[in-house]
Amino acid sequence: RRKWNKMVKVLEELEESCATPVGRLKQVVDAMAVEMHAGLASEGGSKLKMLLTYVDKLPNGSEKGTYYALDLGGTNFRVLRVHLGGQRSAILGQDIERQPIPQHLMTSTSKDLFDFIASSLKDFIEKEGNVLEQASPRRRELGFTFSFPVKQSSVSSGVLMKWTKGFAIEDTIGKDVSECLQLAMSRKGLNVRVAALINDTVGTLALGHYNDEDTVAAVIIGTGTNACYLERADAIIKCQGLLTTSGGMVVNMEWGNFWSSHLPRTSYDNDLDVASPNPNNQGFEKMISGMYLGDIVRRVLLRMSEESDDFRSSSSKLAIPFVLRTPLMAAMHEDDSPDLSEVAKILGEVLELPDVPVKVRKLVVKVCDVITRRAARLAAAGIVGILKKIGRDGDGGIASGKFWSERPSRMRRTVVAIEGGLYTSYTLFREYLNEAMTEILGEEVSSNVILRVMEDGSGTGAALIAAANSPSE
Ligand code: ADP
């Protein structure tokens, strides 16, 4: 009895410290907008890097021809070919090949990695049916999605600042990754030009904008999380006199590193951060993304297991970091069987906690709910922060005069492209995120804000940006 009460108390304290009432979410919205401003004002002015992408024209459907893309951003690597018909047509067709990056290449040399990428592209191109093409190959145009922090110097070049996600190749750091690829392709005898070097969120934004010109921002919530959006060039104060053809530029926020004292942080978050390879970094990402959610839940369950014999076994795996992957946590959360048999199965098979009573299983589900709900609601606040910065949160209209308050229906339609396993595959996460958007913005404004899923945007978008930045056919 007393032990049960102690477990319940762990849950109650968790709920309290993870609370995200709408008032608090609005503080996060404001903090995001303020930090964006600070990051644009000066280099190092904020934890948000607000990186320039030099992408100043987004594809709009007029692009025509065949373009290629390489997408390197995590464990998988993809090669794509995209056929575009112009005249606002949908994408005519595309071919994609995926393959895992051999583990040893992630810590080898720059040359080994880029040679591998170039030969994958060569194999892909050689499989093309068109014999005529191959007899007299014209130069091909390619977009390179490289989802690591890069300091860009133009739309098609940039220097790697640091590796993340398990890659560690010392001699690439400080090099222009576009040139590394260009040289490797030359070694393979490929006549291909890197027309664009982008980050995955920029690709998602490009595909979003290709499909719908009201798309102004893109968000990825998968293993990690990041966002980018279209900013006015004159608002990018740290880069005075920035000339762009459109007057705007896509800014890569690197929002995973966002931090604010308004974020509801717990001792579990703290412990996770301290144990991580990058303490004090990626604070927002550590509360939101798929890499971490399962492990926060594991930490809470471990704490509970210290309170009760009902939730303990000699072989329990709860103390092992990252044993509970986010998709398994989600499966427990979404278990709708009356006796929570899926929860029992995962607790038994993955965590080696057999025969957990139903009432304890219910507590486990509740813990998953608290952590996921907080993540989804904070992500929503982040998105509204972007909308606020660009005056699309409905507030700007009121500030700019009476006209708005008289005719609220004049709010412009605003689309945010969204991608990543958490939003696309985790139903409750998606529902909590959408619900929080409405709570923060209100019914009226949120009816004009559309979150639109972009499948494979990171790769396809790179080909589209290459098209928008190539000499037209
Ligand atoms: P990545 O971000 O690695 O490029 P994704 O966008 O597909 O790839 O995201 C994969 C991440 O999404 C996984 O790390 C996992 O944490 C999370 N994920 C995938 N499917 C689910 C699911 N059904 N429920 C919860 N999380 C999921």
Image (cartoon, helix red, strand yellow):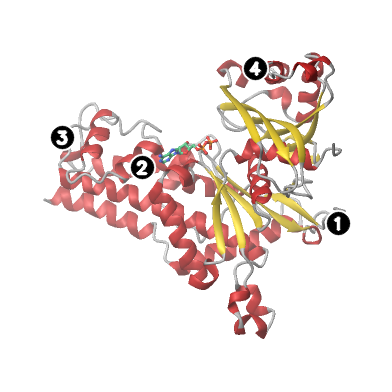
Per the model, the C-alpha gap separating discs 2 and 4 is 35 Å
Q: Do the residues bearing badges 1 and 4 touch, measured as CB atoms within 8 Å?
A: no
Q: Earlier in the sequence, mark 1 or mark 4?
A: 4
**Disc 1 residue: CB within 8 Å of ligand 1:** no
Give the percent coordinates (x, y) of residue 149.
68, 38
Mark 3 sits on what residue?
Answer: 355
Mark 4 sits on what residue?
Answer: 108
Q: Secondary structure at mark 4?
A: loop
| Relative side of 95 to 348, left or right | right
Give the percent coordinates (x, y) of residue 188.
77, 14
Depth check, mark 2 against mark 4: the one in front is 2
Say which amino acid is labelled 1.
Answer: Gln
Q: Residues within 10 Å of mark 4 (few under 14, many from 20)?
A: some
Per the model, the C-alpha gap separating discs 4 and 3 is 46 Å
Mark 2 sits on what residue?
Answer: 330
Mark 1 sits on what residue?
Answer: 240
**Disc 2 residue: CB within 8 Å of ligand 1:** yes
Q: Secondary structure at mark 3?
A: loop
